[in-house]
Image (spheres, grey):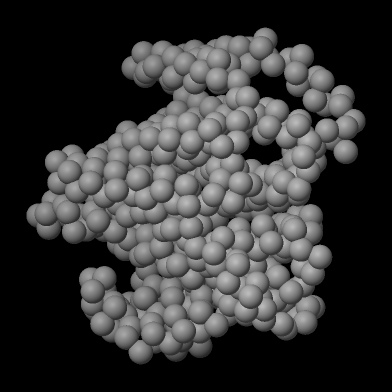
Amino acid sequence: MNPFRKLLGDTAIYGISSIVGRFLNWWLVPYHAGIFRPEEYGVVSNLYGYVAFAIILLTYGMETGYFRFASQSDDREKVFSTSVISLFTTTLLFLSVMFLFKKEIATAMQYGDHPEFVWWLAVTVGLDAVTSIPFAQLRLQSRPVKFAVVKLINIALNIGLNLFFLSLCPLIIQYYPEGIISRVYDPSVGVGYVFIANLLASLSTLLLLMPEILSVRLEFDSSLFRKMMGYSFPILVIGLAGMVNQNIDKILIPFLIPAEQDPMFQLGIYGANYKLGVLMNMFIQAFRYAFEPFFFSRSSSEDTENPKIYAIVMKYFIIFGLLIFLGMTLYIDIVKLLIPPEYHPGLKVVPIILMADLFFGIFFSASIWYKLKDRTWYGAYIALTGAVITILLNFLLIPLIGYMGSAITVFICFFIMMVINYFWGQKYYPIPYDLKRIGIYFAAAILMYILSRFSAPLFPALKYFLNSLLLLAFLGIISGLEKKELLSILKKKKG
């Protein structure tokens, strides 16, 4: 079977849940921005920064460990059961600690007045951790349709509940103040309903995945667990360091920006504009869902074509990423209409974040070498290096230039991680990346972006016309250089 067609097909299906689903979910950003003041939206950005760390801790690399061991095992059910039991046990311990000390933890997070926010999110994270292995099983079994359906139901329910709690309930109370809704709905909860909606959506996901969880025998293999942890623990370190690189700024801003400069207001603006880069994130996530099982399924093969296949995949991954970068930045004046004007001062971070996210996607795609060679500690070293850079630069730049310092830090961090990963990877698992063409595409995309800035003062119709010509020019460069290879890939029957 043509491996490129399979990868492209699986990416397209996963894209239904990742790209389409997360795009639908992303509409909550302008929706919340229109309902909440920037300082209120800053609470959402801040708490979900903590959530990102919590989910990494609670899954501790077990998802990747499951892929590695299940793809090589004759008894996949044992690997699945061991993984699920492990995550279920640690999640129960986590929730017990959070429940017993929720007031103290909330106070340390500066939410002493709302410990319920912390508890609701803790339960949500716990549910997401328990369902991570069933989702991984669906991917390993090449069942992207079931995966996509469950993800879309989760997203649809989350969006629906947000609309219900934040718009419909206040409207009902306005016209029927003595009705049943007024007895159960409390307007003072405010942004808390964002977390309640997420919690209920995650609960629905657990229920939908119960058939997968209950379909296998419950068996915990302690020897297998120790091997999986030996492989997965560096993945935990990588994940935690990665979350430092992506989300620590949303935790640090309230502490590093003086109170007189309204840090939650700045965080709200930064958080909303950061999420304008969601299209790049959705593309990377969809690619990841398809790429991980794709390369693990080929890892047992000694096919000398594998490195060439990975190199071609990387090239087209970068091409698509650069197209997203240009599509977002050349039409930023249209994109900005999605958020209220008071958030527009933060638009300057969008190009930086988009390119930083692309660097991260390249880092992830090129990280196959340490996963295939069981050298996951090298990934941990790279991620820890990035984390040190992120923390140091955030402490240096945020007090000086506010959230702009956070954006610059993310860009520098992911660029350095990408470069280190490339050189180490070429030493242990050489892949013939076409650096010449990749360099041409990066240079062309940056040139198109710079040229587009000269059209900024023009009236909209002329500006969009000129920017469209720039985008077409970039597509022309790609077509001229890749046309023959694309045709050969599409015609190829065997990979």
Q: Is residue 285 visible?
A: no
Q: Where residue 279 appears, x then y in whole percent?
A: 54, 41
Compared with 154, 243 (above or below) is: above
- Check the picture and name the quadrant holding the N terminus: top right
Horizontal relation, residue 480 to residue 30: left or right: right
Q: Residue at x 86, y 27 (%)?
A: 492
**Looking at this view, is 188 or 29 the one in front?**
29
- Residue 104 lies in what quarter of the image? bottom left
Q: Is residue 100 visible?
A: yes
**Looking at this view, is 277 or 286 the one in front?**
286
Q: Residue at x 77, y 68 (%)?
A: 76
- Residue 274 lies in what quarter of the image? top left
Q: Where residue 416 appears, x then y in whole percent?
A: 38, 35
Q: Residue at x 60, y 36 (%)?
A: 429
Q: Where residue 229 appears, x then y in whole percent?
A: 55, 67
Horizontal relation, residue 273 to residue 283: left or right: left
